[in-house]
Image (cartoon, rainbow, N blue to C red):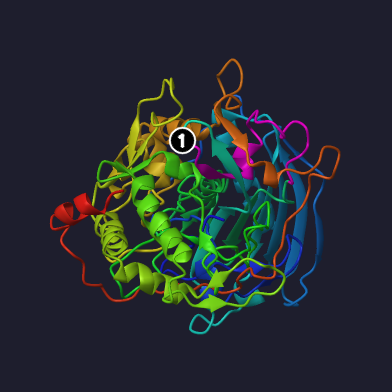
């Protein structure tokens, strides 16, 4: 799945819930770090104004909200509503707060965020989203010192990815279901894809000082524009920043990065869905490296495809397995005949391999050096008319899980591509749009191109993007025709805690980028 990347002033973990209507439950630090979402730290220049209306904004419809007693806090209420934003989004909205007016304002802000996206893209099939405004640690009066969720703003992530095989290179890429729903691959229209209950999971802190563009007041320096934050997070939910090939820092004290690894058995197809407290990656067992995401088809590190680095590590691991290396310690996992390994033993074996060790160091060195990571929209498929490049965030040293690699470079803050930077000036959405002369949606032209490259369709296109001639869904992930296409696969090997910690550790020792060039030349296969 995408790691949650919580928006937090101190890199805290996102709050969680076991289901859209259940009370949000506290995540352990490890479990929160394990969620693959993408969020940003949005630090707000005061000055605000009312949001401009969108052109041809999709119509919002509602089933009618209901309010019930909060199950954990007698001072709070739970506000529930189902909202449709045109044919683009079906949102199940839950709000835990002491003020129903706040919940209605938050709901409207989230609707406007979804409308912004739906005004820029058109969608073949409706995406389902679970959105909750949560109370940190399930209370309206949390202790800032003991409640890890207190400082969290929010996060969003795609819940499920489906394996898709590209015909030109034969590589399997993981597609978020929100994207796969928009494509014409065999099995989609036939109802053979096991869609999850929700394609996107989003959570926002009810106790933060949110500002709403409809409030009639100017935003002050202590407030955050919820519509701005929600648009950023929903964009992550669509797949922006969904890196699986180089964002795993197994040991925060070690200057190395590597791909995510699967903690579910290979025969589990499609892969299990991520939830607010479980995920199928980077757990306490290592079956194999995760397949790269569709995002990774377009990412280039130091002018080389990220997949080149990935291939060295994947091939090295496979060679160790085939050689039955004693360095790999096996782990017994019930209900599967597949061999699982101790993650620490795998990483240690890779570190001792000259090629693999060099690659992991290079991923970290380049991943913490500005302007080394680029998303090239013209990378695939052959014949695409897209040519733009987006420089991604690789300037943070030490590496920051949830901020590094999954966002636009911070220097884009003063341009029309500001939406997906990990930290932004303290300002309202409209102020940012006006200052940068961005489109009224807030989605810059290259930021839009990124999703178009992945397979989404522009709202002004004549038809829909086609990928049926260049890709196929892995047949193992498809259901037989006529069977139910709704499901959220689970597996006993899924992790509830991550091997990586969420707290940023001290600055690790890093090899100079220049010194890696010669070593890398010998590492490529």
Front-lying residue, 428 or 479: 479
Q: Tell me if I can see residue 32 in this picture.
A: yes
Say if the magenta span includes residue 409.
Answer: no
Front-lying residue, 432 or 337: 337
Residue drawn at the location 53% of the way across and 44% of the way down: 173
Q: How far across and down, in percent of the image, does residue 461 sit?
A: 56, 18
Say if the magenta span includes residue 184.
Answer: yes
Location of mark 1 (residue)? 169
Dominant secondary structure of the residues highlighted in magenta in the image: loop
- The span shown in magenta is 169-194
Seen in the picture, residue 489 relative to 73 is either above or below; the reply is above
Q: Tell me if I can see residue 209 in this picture.
A: no
Q: How far across and down, in percent of the image, does residue 51 sit?
A: 51, 38
Seen in the picture, residue 367 relative to 57 is either above or below; the reply is below
Residue drawn at the location 75% of the way across and 67% of the way down: 22
In the visual, does 365 lie left or right of 203? Answer: left
Q: Quadrant of residue 472?
A: top right
């Amino acid at each position: 799945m995408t790691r949650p990347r919580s928006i937090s002033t101190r890199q805290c973990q996102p709050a969680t819930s076991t289901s859209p209507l259940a009370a949000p439950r506290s995540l352990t630090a490890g479990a929160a770090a394990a969620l693959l979402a993408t969020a940003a730290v949005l630090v707000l220049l005061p000055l605000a104004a009312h949001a401009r209306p969108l052109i041809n904004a999709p119509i919002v419809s509602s089933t009618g909200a209901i309010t019930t007693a909060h199950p954990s806090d007698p001072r709070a209420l739970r506000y529930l509503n189902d909202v449709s934003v045109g044919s683009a989004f079906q949102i199940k909205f839950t709000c835990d707060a002491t003020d129903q007016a706040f919940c209605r304002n938050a709901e409207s802000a989230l609707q406007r965020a979804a409308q912004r996206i739906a005004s820029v893209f058109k969608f073949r099939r409706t995406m389902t989203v679970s959105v909750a405004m949560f109370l940190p640690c399930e209370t309206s009066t949390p202790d800032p010192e003991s409640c890890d969720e207190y400082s969290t703003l929010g996060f969003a992530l795609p819940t499920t990815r489906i394996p898709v095989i590209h015909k030109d290179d034969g590589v399997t890429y993981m597609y978020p279901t929100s994207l796969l729903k928009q494509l014409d691959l065999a099995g989609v229209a036939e109802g053979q894809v096991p869609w999850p209950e929700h394609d996107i999971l989003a959570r926002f802190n009810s106790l933060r000082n949110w500002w709403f563009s409809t409030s009639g007041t100017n935003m002050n320096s202590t407030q955050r524009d919820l519509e701005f934050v929600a648009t950023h997070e929903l964009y992550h939910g669509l797949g922006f920043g969904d890196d699986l090939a180089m964002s795993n820092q197994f040991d925060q004290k070690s200057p190395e990065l590597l791909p995510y690894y699967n903690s579910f058995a290979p025969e589990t197809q499609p892969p299990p869905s991520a939830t607010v407290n479980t995920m199928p990656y980077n757990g306490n067992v290592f079956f194999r490296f995760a397949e790269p995401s569709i995002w990774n088809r377009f990412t280039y590190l130091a002018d080389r495809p990220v997949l080149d680095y990935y291939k060295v590590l994947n091939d090295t691991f496979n060679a160790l397995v085939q050689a039955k290396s004693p360095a790999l310690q096996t782990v017994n996992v019930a209900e599967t005949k597949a061999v699982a390994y101790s993650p620490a033993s795998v990483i240690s074996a890779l570190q001792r391999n000259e090629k693999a060790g060099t690659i992991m160091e290079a991923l970290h060195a380049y991943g913490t050096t500005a302007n080394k990571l680029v998303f090239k929209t013209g990378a695939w498929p052959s014949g695409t008319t897209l040519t733009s490049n987006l420089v991604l965030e690789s300037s943070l040293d030490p590496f920051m899980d949830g901020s590094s690699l999954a966002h636009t470079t911070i220097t884009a803050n003063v341009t029309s591509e500001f939406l997906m930077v990990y930290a932004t000036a303290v300002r309202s959405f409209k102020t940012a749009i006006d200052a940068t002369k961005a489109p009224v949606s807030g989605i810059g032209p290259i930021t839009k191109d990124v999703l178009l490259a992945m397979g989404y369709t522009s709202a002004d296109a004549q038809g829909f993007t086609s990928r049926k001639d260049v890709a196929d869904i892995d047949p193992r992930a498809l259901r037989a025709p006529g069977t139910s296409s709704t499901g959220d696969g689970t597996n006993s090997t899924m992790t509830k805690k991550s091997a990586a910690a969420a707290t940023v550790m001290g600055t690790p020792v890093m090899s100079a980028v220049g010194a890696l060039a010669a070593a890398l030349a010998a590492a490529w296969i």
